[in-house]
Image (cartoon, helix red, strand yellow):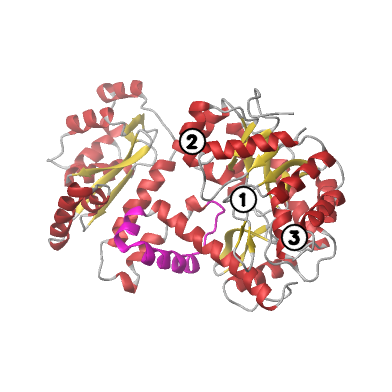
Amino acid sequence: MAAAGDARLADVGIGLRQPHYAELLRTTPPLAFVEVHSENFFADGGAALAVLQQARSSYAVSLHGVGLGLGSAVGLDPWHLDRLLRLADRIDPVRVSDHACFARAEGRGGVVHANDLLPIAFSEASLAVMATNVSQVQDRLRRPLLVENLSSYVSFADDAMSEPEFFARLCRGTGCGMLLDVNNLMVNALNADAPDPVAACCAFVDALPAGIVGEIHVAGYCETGEIVIDDHGSRVRPAVWAVCAHALRRFGALPVLVEWDTDVPALGVLLAEAAHAATLHG
Amino acid sequence: MDEAQRQVALMRALAGAPADGLRERGARAARGLEAYRANAEASAERALAAVFGTVQAMVGRDDFRHLAREFWSAHPPQRGDLGEWGAAFPAWLASHPAMAPWPYLGDSARLDVALHRNERAADAALDAASLSLLESGDPARLRLELMPGSALIRSAWPIATIHRAHALEGDEAERAFEGVRDAIAAERGEDMLVVRQGWRAVVVPLSQPEARWTEALLAGADLASALDRAGAGFDFAAWLQAAIRNDWMKGVAVSND
């Protein structure tokens, strides 16, 4: 069993966020990798990029995008793809990922970017759009991409396939992998009033083919009373850890990322969550 | 449904149009759409506040939040990097009817965005060897290059003074704001250079000859023309010393044309 005192937590990482830059670089806790949101490092230069390059000398870096809009029917923004390629060349990441969402669409005066992870339909047409866009990214980056399942607050009435089937076909068709966010599964299950949310999430995991998942994300969520929001602003809930453990049993010892993006706590709190994730690797 | 149409329809629903084709109905659909709207509003405020700190301090958090929402609707982002969003904010703010009593807000926003862009600009170091060209080269064929991200702001308002006051605290800030009030009342214009000091962008007040000189350099003028534009009050030797000492200059280049 891995523990916090091990030389390096068994393939567990945390998000590298601004409040922790100095402490993390100074203390270099034994993490297998750190994750960053790619878009935060798209600038030509500056302090943030220098921090990331310094972090890279101690850690593998996972580039996790939030802005490609891989499901956008209008296609990808070439500027965005250029910046991602430049960043990947600079950082030599261990993994590159983004989300199964759309973000770009025709608006007033041209294509606008929602800067959010908007839901896609699970349809043949949507699958074709995703496959084309994912292939374009992979061709440019010359590496496979991991695509993450969403927490979505609305969905479409005319879905033609299940979400696991959508991912299975996307991965088979493009050679990409899946980034399985088990917190997103839980948020969706809770918002759908699933009678047994853990069972619903585990059923989703069991419906995925073995071999397509390349990384697992865990995070905290918040309940407003009316809706459950995937805010990445608290500790991982026990039920989410349970689904994570189930996924690791099914898929083997995959990299696990602990995400915490709002109300970012002391680094020690995040490292304790990472240490817990390491215990699940068995 | 065509995917492009479906996505446009959802974006329009988030902007307030009726939602169509969703599995969720009634209050459940409304709650879901509201979650996305709330996220967009928070993103707008966070992204603009990260750039326009001086403007936010001047108008206050609540009004800034409303301005951010309004600007998001009027000029939605076109890129998936919100650090790139907001270039149109200064002009939009300057022409906003509700901001008319504060005519210096637009220029303050221009300074804020120049500082933001400077801190995102490419890193560079002085090419010290290129300085020898100043002794041997023809001034009409030499160009002095400032560091990437360097920007000149010329304003009819005392926006460097305003910016500096907002960076201070306590008694110092109190005294600085007295100076700001006097300068605004006198409609005292200011020129300034935005450059990087370490990792932070800073504001360097400029005299009028220095501003004319900087304007010429940033426009790519050759050394002889830039000196001519700067005029009699410009001390090139003193400027060069300061430029080297403070990392304003990237180097000297020879024009090929």
Residue in view at x 67 percent, y 64 percent: A153
Give the residue pinned by disc 2. A21
The image shows residue A101, relative to residue B97, as above or below, that is above
Chain under disc 2: A
Q: Are marks 2 and 3 on the same chain?
A: yes
Q: Is there CB contact under 8 Å for labels 1 and 3? A: no
Quarter holding the N terminus of chain B is bottom right
Give the residue pinned by disc 3. A189
Q: Which residues are magenta?
A: B53-81
Quarter holding the C terminus of chain B is top left
Secondary structure type for disc 2: helix
Q: CA distance from mark 2 to mark 1?
A: 20 Å
Q: Please report whichever mark, 2 or 1, sits nearer to the chain's N-terminal start.
A: 2
Q: CA distance from mark 2 to mark 3?
A: 34 Å
Residue type (three-letter) at the residue carrying disc 1: Val
Secondary structure type for disc 3: helix
Dot 2 surroundings within 10 Å: few (below 14), some, or many (20 or more)? some
User: Of discs 2 and 1, which sits in the foreground?
Assistant: 2
Q: Please report whichever mark, 2 or 3, sits nearer to the chain's N-terminal start.
A: 2
Chain under disc 3: A
Name which quarter of the figure residue A142 lies in.
Answer: top right
Chain under disc 1: A
